[in-house]
């Protein structure tokens, strides 16, 4: 199962991390953003790069200054986004949209550091919006989780959004 | 369809039908997107021979290709055999474009270079010279911005841009190194008529303090022309609404720094501005060097190109029917900026605008709802209004255009709809009026 060929993580770690992902999804569905931030390491990085559609054989060089991002957040920037969502002025979220996250395909691998783990997963965010229409966003995630005294915390998340054109007017949600 | 009653510039009134009528939309594709110069690509996006970029002109899929001799050509992205799409990649570099369907192959100059079984199946009777990709009638560049035009006999690009070049140059020509668009294309679908985001960005300073109050609270680090969170006050001396430029316009503050008002850490950018300002004053003169370069400016090139030096996003809207658009955004930089500043601009642009942009994420639903509220049997018969600050505009020394004071006014929107109406009424370019009102008053007169 593991590409690296090293000994698999203990069942306890796999279960603990999987539960962590489900818990995180439930916190976000309930807009318990402050509790969600408690799941983060202080040095967390949270990134989603822009998508591009290229021929397989294309040899043009990568974008000079960078591909650009949808998210490029640290803890302060996540807080800034949450401040906006909490401001009472985000009309697109009032009345609240019906948002449900489905997390699946969880795969846990050993990381280089003893107290860390690599976790792959798929997330589907189902949003029934104020206009009555439903949008579904799908993304793959590759995380690094770190064991702290009070449990696993997210150290890094790379999100691969599976949409070349965003089928919605905003991403007021976290993945 | 006669649109003379659908827009009234004198009173600032538009019929909601212009946001929902299928018939008017077809007419827009012909008379606006089929006639005006449309932005295709920035030269920085296709630097090398063989580099190509796919875009749209109206609903027509277009591929823009850098040629061996450095010039740029644009073609309809449609096979001349059975019409299939030729290029399916967003951009890249190619020696040839081969159609998926039967394998016809086109060279970057558009010529049909190879046809499978040409001798055996066509008996050598195919005239390949007549079956090259169909070129866009006119392609021209203004200081890095490449435009295309389907019309057979349009004004030159320079004339089309007219006095809007005064504002374009504040980005394109402030520094000697020129400009670039950076990052991949940030694409989103909005259930909006294409005119509503253009109207919003071209002149609607009114919505900033209200629609974006949450975002302003979260990221505002400097004052912006006295605009306050919650729309509780505004300072009319802090900015200008400039229109009358053949349908192009600018909404600008005048302090030379407020472009960076929504950067949580603006210091490096402000240092860059102050260090280079003497040089920019030398290049562009005092008004633009001191008051505009570094200021928050919303620039609109009719019909569907908008960019904001300062917040540094550059955008086109591609119509997809009367009720839908694709909104494409890039980050814009000056090539003389140090790499760290360019990277910080790309990052902040993506934070504030684009897919998860703190500001963009406020606008989409409003625009979509305005569109939807023009589709009903009853609402389609109703009007909407841009009647704020009527008849309070005039010339201003050192600037082109017909100018209203302040960022909060609906002056620019009225000119946008006026231009829309002029194009929709005219059969061809000869019927479209020209009014680069009040070409720039010579700058020497300002201090006098
Ligand atoms: S449609 Fe392109 S080769 Fe036939
Ligand atoms: Fe806005």
Image (tube, grey):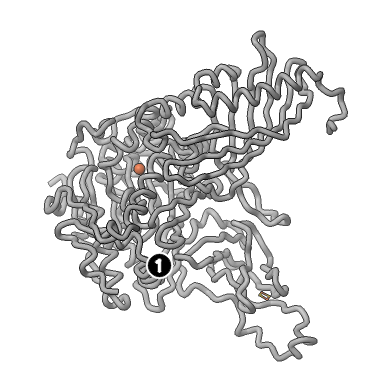
x, y (%) of residue B299? 33, 51
Classify B88 as above or below B236. Answer: below
Classify B404 as above or below A107. Answer: below
Q: Residue at x 44, y 60 (%)?
A: B319
Please name the residue that numbered disc 1 is placed on. Answer: B33
Depth check: B189 or B100 in front?
Answer: B189
x, y (%) of residue B305? 39, 56
Ligand 2 within 8 angstroms of badge 1 C-beta: no
Quadrant hosting ligand 2: top left
Depth check: B29 or A36 in front?
Answer: A36
Evaluate whether residue B181 shows in this view.
Answer: yes
Q: Quadrant of residue B104?
A: bottom right
x, y (%) of residue A70? 54, 39
The answer to whether B34 appears left or right of B383 in the picture is right
Q: Residue at x 30, y 70 (%)?
A: B424
Q: Residue at x 12, y 53 (%)?
A: B391
Classify B365 as above or below A53. Answer: above
The answer to whether B135 appears left or right of B121 in the picture is left
Q: Residue at x 72, y 31 (%)?
A: A106
> How many neighbours does mark 1 have within 10 angstroms: few (below 14), some (14-19), or many (20 or more)?
many
Q: Give the structural element (helix, strand or loop) at label 1.
A: helix
The answer to whether B250 appears left or right of A51 in the picture is left
């Amino acid at each position: 199962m593991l590409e690296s060929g090293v000994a698999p993580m203990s069942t306890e770690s796999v279960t603990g991390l999987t539960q962590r992902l489900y818990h995180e999804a439930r916190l976000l569905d309930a807009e318990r953003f402050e509790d969600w931030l408690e799941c983060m390491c202080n040095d967390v990085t949270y990134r989603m790069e822009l998508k591009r559609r290229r021929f397989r054989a294309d040899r043009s060089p990568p974008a000079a200054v960078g591909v650009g991002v949808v998210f490029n957040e640290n803890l302060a920037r996540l807080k800034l986004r949450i401040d906006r969502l909490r401001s009472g002025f985000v009309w697109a979220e009032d009345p609240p949209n019906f948002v449900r996250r489905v997390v699946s395909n969880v795969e846990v691998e050993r990381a280089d550091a003893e107290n860390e783990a690599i976790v792959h997963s798929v997330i589907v965010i189902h949003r029934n919006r104020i206009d009555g229409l439903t949008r579904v966003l799908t993304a793959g995630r590759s995380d690094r989780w770190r064991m702290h005294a009070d449990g696993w915390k997210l150290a890094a998340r790379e999100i691969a959004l599976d949409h070349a054109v965003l089928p919605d007017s905003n991403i007021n949600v976290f993945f | 369809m006669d649109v003379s009653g659908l827009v009234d510039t004198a009173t600032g009134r538009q019929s909601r039908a212009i946001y929902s009528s299928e018939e008017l939309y077809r007419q827009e594709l012909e008379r606006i997107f089929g006639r005006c110069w449309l932005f295709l690509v920035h030269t920085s996006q296709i630097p090398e021979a063989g580099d190509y970029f796919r875009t749209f002109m109206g609903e027509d899929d277009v591929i823009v290709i850098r040629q061996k001799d450095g010039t740029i050509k644009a073609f309809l992205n449609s096979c001349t055999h059975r019409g299939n799409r030729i290029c399916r990649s967003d951009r890249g570099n190619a020696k040839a474009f081969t159609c998926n369907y039967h394998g016809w192959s086109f060279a970057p100059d558009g010529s049909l270079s190879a046809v499978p079984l040409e001798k055996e199946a066509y008996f050598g009777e195919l005239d390949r010279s007549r079956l090259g990709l169909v070129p866009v009638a006119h392609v021209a560049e203004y200081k890095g911005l490449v435009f295309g035009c389907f019309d057979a006999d349009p004004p030159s690009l320079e004339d089309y841009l007219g006095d809007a070049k005064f504002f374009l140059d504040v980005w394109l020509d402030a520094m000697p190194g020129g400009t670039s668009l950076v990052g991949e294309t940030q694409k989103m679908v909005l259930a909006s008529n294409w005119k509503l985001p253009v109207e919003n960005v071209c002149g609607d300073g009114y919505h900033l303090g209200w629609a974006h109050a949450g975002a302003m609270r979260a990221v505002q680090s400097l004052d912006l022309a006295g605009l306050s969170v919650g729309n509780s006050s505004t300072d009319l001396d802090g900015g200008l609404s400039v229109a009358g430029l053949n349908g192009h316009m600018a909404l600008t503050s005048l302090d030379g720094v407020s472009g960076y008002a929504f950067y949580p850490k603006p210091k490096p950018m402000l240092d860059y501005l102050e260090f280079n300002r003497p040089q920019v004053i030398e290049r562009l003169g005092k008004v633009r060097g001191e008051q505009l370069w570094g200021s928050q400016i919303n620039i609109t090139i009719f019909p569907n190109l908008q960019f904001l030096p300062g917040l540094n996003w550059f955008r086109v809207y591609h119509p997809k029917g009367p009720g839908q658009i694709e909104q494409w955004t890039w980050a814009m930089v000056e090539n003389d900026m140090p790499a760290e500043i360019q990277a910080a601009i790309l990052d902040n642009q993506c934070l504030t605008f684009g897919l998860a942009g703190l500001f963009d994420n406020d606008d989409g639903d409003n625009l979509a709802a305005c569109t939807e509220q023009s589709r009903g049997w009853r609402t389609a018969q109703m009007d909407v209004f841009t009647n704020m600050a009527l008849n309070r505009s005039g010339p201003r020394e050192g600037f082109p255009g017909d100018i209203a004071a302040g960022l909060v006014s609906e002056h620019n929107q009225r000119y946008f709809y006026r231009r829309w109406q002029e194009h929709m009424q005219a059969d061809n370019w000869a019927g479209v009026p020209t009014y680069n009102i009040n070409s720039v008053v010579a700058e020497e007169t300002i201090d006098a």
